[in-house]
Amino acid sequence: MSAAKTLDALRREIDQIDTEIHELIRRRTKVVETVRDLKKGQPIKIRPAREDEILYRLVAEHSGNFPKRELTRIWRELIVATLSFEGPFSVAVYGNDDDDGCRDLARDFYGSYSPMTVFPSARRVIETVQSHGATLGVLPLPRPDDKEPWWPHLVGQNEDAPRVIARLPFAGPGNGRDANAEAIVICPVDREETGRDRSWLLIEAEDQPGLTPVVAAMKKAGFSVRFKANWRDQQAGGPWLYLIEVDGFFGAQDRAVSRFVEALGSPVNRVVCLGTYGIPLSAEELAPAPEKKPAARSKRKTVAKPKRAPSSKVKSTPASRKRRS
């Protein structure tokens, strides 16, 4: 009977905590509604850098036995659920009968109930996002040996050109069929800097300077290169395109880009920033965090006051009183 009473008491405590969590969700929603009103008139209301910073902070502050991956999933559902009433929100996803990797990653990061449309070609995804048929698009991570890469289609001159805003998975692999699937998210919005970013730079050149000289010039200019690929439309001809992923938050107008052009020594038509993303959480960051124990109070040691010599006749002055105090 005693154990049953204890279980009943614990269950009542859990019910009370659930009620408090629910109330906090309602409070959070009201604040988001105020934010929505302030953003009125903006066609796209998502702030990918802000979303990443929320997860960075929560994971860094977390402790205890509750898994961090599930913690991030809860907050992703919260974030996306509120996006749905800030304005239209939908996702265009690349996929086919043999490849559900992007679809699984999109569901994990952008919510179980967000409207998603699957397209059999990456170009259709990009066109859908550019025409505002979807808020954002999810595409497979580029590979150096792609015969027809999708990233050249991101090169655009207008404000509606989609840009890279995220890399998935953000909080470790999910339970999709392909545990090794990785993807890039595109959207026609600019990101803010988070302090842990990577940038995609595209170099366009008429001649073929070669991938090795391009990477060497990037490193000489101070860039830390993470990924590299090049491509040229063999049928239509045209310029050579080089995709370089680098550590840090960079734009096409950064002084480092000018240093790269100088270091390359070959004519360059232009350098375009295709976007930036927040670096996903690492396995170390997602590892279980030990329970934080309250800091123990330091015990003050009692220091014995020195005894006065009986013969001391020194009078107490304000200064001496101050020193003793």
Image: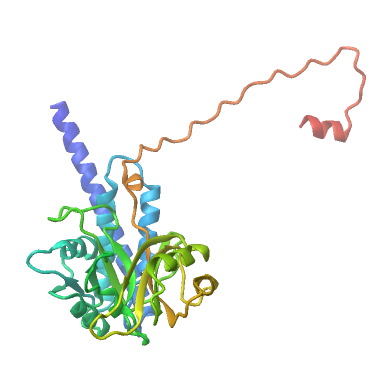
Q: Nearer the viewer, residue 91 or 302?
A: 91
Residue 121 coordinates in the image, percent (x, y)? 16, 76
Residue 95 coordinates in the image, percent (x, y)? 14, 69
- Position of the N terminus, as image quadrant, is top left
Residue in the image at 36% along x and 70% along y? 243
How many discs appear? 0
Q: Is residue 57 left or right of residue 26?
A: right
Displayed quadrant of residue 206: bottom left
Q: Let me know if residue 297 appears in the view.
A: yes
Considering every residue shown, the one lying at the far left of the view is 97
What scheme was used to colour the molecule? rainbow
Q: Let me know if residue 222 appears in the view.
A: no
In the figure, 85 relative to 277: above or below? Answer: below
Q: Nearer the viewer, residue 303 or 106?
A: 106
- Position of the C terminus, as image quadrant, is top right
Residue in the image at 21% along x and 79% along y? 123
Residue 127 coordinates in the image, percent (x, y)? 23, 82
Residue in the image at 46% along x and 63% along y? 216
Residue 40 coordinates in the image, percent (x, y)? 35, 82
Residue in the image at 92% along x and 22% along y? 314
Displayed quadrant of residue 303: top right
Q: Is residue 223 left or right of residue 58?
A: right
